[in-house]
Amino acid sequence: MAYSIAGALLPIAVTFLLGFVGAWRGDFKREHASVLNTLVLTYALPLMLFAGTLSTSRASLGQGVPLLIVSCVAVVGMYGVVFLLSRVVFAVSTSTSALAALTASSPAVPFMGPAILGHFFGQTSVVPIAIASLVINLTVVPATLLLLGLDPVSGTGRGNDRAGQGDHYVASRRTVLSAVVGKLAETIRKPLVWAPVVAFATVLSGVAVPSLLLNALLLLGHATGGVSLFAAGIVLATNRVSVSSPVLLLVLLKNVVQPALVLGGLRWLGHGDPLLSEAVLTMAIPAMPIVAMLALQYRVAEALAASSLFFSVIGSVITLAVFIVLTG
């Protein structure tokens, strides 16, 4: 058991620490992480999602409908709860709330799924990886990009002229609507958003894509996991790791609460393997490196994102082992 867990997580931990050491030695600086960030988010990750989805047959996606439903409830549900709590209860900014919600809700399936799920499920791991990646990249990632891109716009006027206030209120509502529509269009144009959508539509249409083309796309796509973890290590080295209540809460929600709710819910509904083990272990995967990348790109909550990612990855050595035992 210990050997299997170490075999799945050791490459992730080593790559993460290499980025940290590289920045600590001075070989890489903060601006280098930004370059790697652009490489992953604009090219490598969209290519991996596009080719990985096209590699999954329509029949396999059809058989994975129960897992699709579980993933949607677990990811979107957790995202919504954390965002509302952060925004309404704790009065945190919209951008920070969006990053916190993404951290707590989205396992790093596109980045770490092949290493972790592939180690335990072999070739059949392609279905949970594809489904979870689709759910994350078609729902919460676009929502986070949209929320990060929206600038706060005032919607009230403070003059004494009530008629003027009414005109200003109408103009402000139009400004807000225009800003939302503009940012939504900008978000949709990002390869990270439209690539999995196009691939998913292609699979559903039944159009066959030559394996030669898929292999050509995956050459750079396969670099996603390693480069993103290495860049996350650089980000971590350039930010002070802090242990705070928000960090510990986000790690607890991602590593423990989310997979535990999936485990309890599926057992309560009477479901067993393979759905149970696939769904639970998929949700038990630690937070996505893209959280630290987006924090760096938008200059929002960088220390919180880097610290949460670090402790989520390190803590997953224990939490994943626990859930492997519980589902075994």
Image: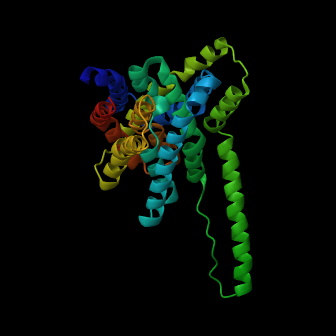
Residue 300 can be seen in this image = no
Number of disc labels: 0
- Using the image as rendered, state which of residue 228 and residue 245 is in the foreground: 245
Query: Which residue extends farthest left?
Result: 2
* Residue at the (38%, 37%) spot, across then down: 284
- Using the image as rendered, state which of residue 124 and residue 186 is in the foreground: 124
Residue 6 % position (x, y): 29, 23
Residue 312 % position (x, y): 34, 40
Q: Is residue 191 left or right of residue 1?
A: right
Q: Is residue 205 left or right of residue 110?
A: right
In which image quadrant can residue 263 be found? top left
Query: Which residue extends farthest front?
Result: 270
Residue 91 % position (x, y): 44, 65
Residue 77 can be seen in this image = yes
* Quarter of the figure with the N terminus: top left
In which image quadrant can residue 159 be found? bottom right
Q: How is the image coloured?
A: rainbow
- Using the image as rendered, state which of residue 37 and residue 71 is in the foreground: 71
* Quarter of the figure with the C terminus: top left
Q: Is residue 8 above or below residue 140?
A: above
Q: Is residue 206 above or below residue 243?
A: above
* Residue at the (34%, 26%) spot, across then down: 9
In which image quadrant can residue 241 be found? top left
Residue 283 % position (x, y): 42, 38
